[in-house]
Image (cartoon, rainbow, N blue to C red):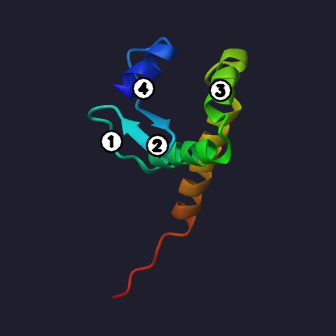
Amino acid sequence: MPPRLGGWGLGQRTVAAITLWRTVYLAPRTPFHPELLLHELRHVHQFRASIAFPVRYLWESVRRGYHRNRYETDAQQYAALRVRAHASHPPTQDV
């Protein structure tokens, strides 16, 4: 249900995922992509950083729109950076 509510807030049927405090909700049949999960993990960090985060997030979305919301861009950058870092330094396997 939370992904559907998040989607409605954006004028969509649903979203792939939504984070509420320390809980990440994935829409049904959403694949567990590392970048999506890292993006949502960043939102957990944002919730933990400030009790006012939900209000600030909503205000950012109203003022700048979802895609230019500073918390969304921060989460996108956080996830992309970690995915790129992992790709350039994959873990080694002992043989």
Q: Check disc 1 and give the amino acid type.
A: Pro
Tell me the residue at 65%/26% (across/down): 55
Task: State which tag comes first along the sequence, 2 or 4.
Answer: 4
So how many labels did they put on this image? 4
Q: Nearer the viewer, residue 80 or 88?
A: 80
Task: State which tag comes first along the sequence, 3 or 2.
Answer: 2
Picture layout, residue 16 above or below residue 48: above
Task: State which tag comes first along the sequence, 4 or 1.
Answer: 4
Task: State which tag comes first along the sequence, 2 or 1.
Answer: 1
Direction from residue 87 to residue 5 in the image, left or right? left
Mark 2 Cα-neighbour bin, 10 Å: few <14, some 14–19, many ≥20: some
Q: Residue 87 placed where, x, y %?
A: 52, 61
Picture layout, residue 23 above or below residue 27: below
**CA gap, disc 2 to disc 1?**
9 Å
**Whether label 2 touches label 1, CB < 8 Å:** yes
Q: Secondary structure at mark 1?
A: loop
Residue highlighted by disc 3: 55
Q: Nearer the viewer, mark 3 or mark 2?
A: 3
Q: Residue 71 placed where, x, y %?
A: 66, 35
Residue highlighted by disc 2: 36
